[in-house]
Image (spheres, helix red, strand yellow):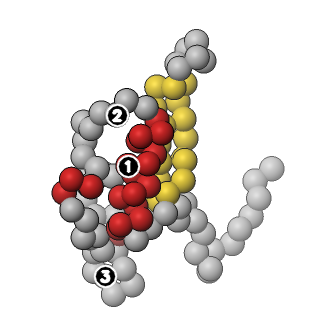
Amino acid sequence: MSGGSESDDSVTTNRRVYIPEVRNEETPAVGMKFDSLDLVYNFYNRYAFLAGFGIRLHSSFWGKNKKEILRKEFVCCKQGAYRNDETRERKR
């Protein structure tokens, strides 16, 4: 959900940008507020389904007391995936 410049991830093989056609009321926007993390997940998961991709949890940021979550990041399920021509070496 970044509103910046076009990234390589959003450009298809024929160099066209993929822009999903989803109704405005079902499109995420900066500043949206939800009453629970479940509502956030369900909203973004529905948007992803309508836009044609899946999501996964990328990371969570906890408060200093480790009792509250300050932020969760959901990303496209393909984010960070390797291409077929890339080597998959394990870091040790």
Q: Residue at x 27, y 55 (%)?
A: 26
Q: Residues within 10 Å of mark 2 (few under 14, many from 20)?
A: few
Residue 79 visible? The answer is no
Q: Position of residue 56 (x, y in %)?
A: 54, 53
Horizontal side of residue 9 vs 90, given as left or right: left
Where is mark 3, residue-wise? Answer: 15
In the rendered image, the residue lying farthest to the bottom is 14
Labels 3 and 2: the sequence-earlier one: 3
Q: How many marks?
A: 3
Residue 64 percent across, percent down from the top left: 55, 14
The residue sitting at 75% across, 53% down in the picture is: 91
Mark 1 residue type: Phe
Residue farthest toward the left in the current orientation of the protein: 24
Which residue is label 1 attached to? 43
In-image side of 30 versus 90 (left or right) = left
Q: SS for tag 3?
A: loop
Element assignment for label 2: loop
Among the two numbered marks 2 and 1 on one chain, the one whose residue lies closer to the N terminus = 2
| Relative to 9, 92 lies left or right | right
The residue carrying pointer 3 sits among few (fewer than 14), some (14 to 19) or many (20 or more) residues within 10 Å by Cα, namely few
Q: From mark 1 to mark 3, how far is it between C-alphas?
A: 30 Å
Residue identified by numbered label 2: 34
Mark 2 vs 1: CB contact within 8 A: yes
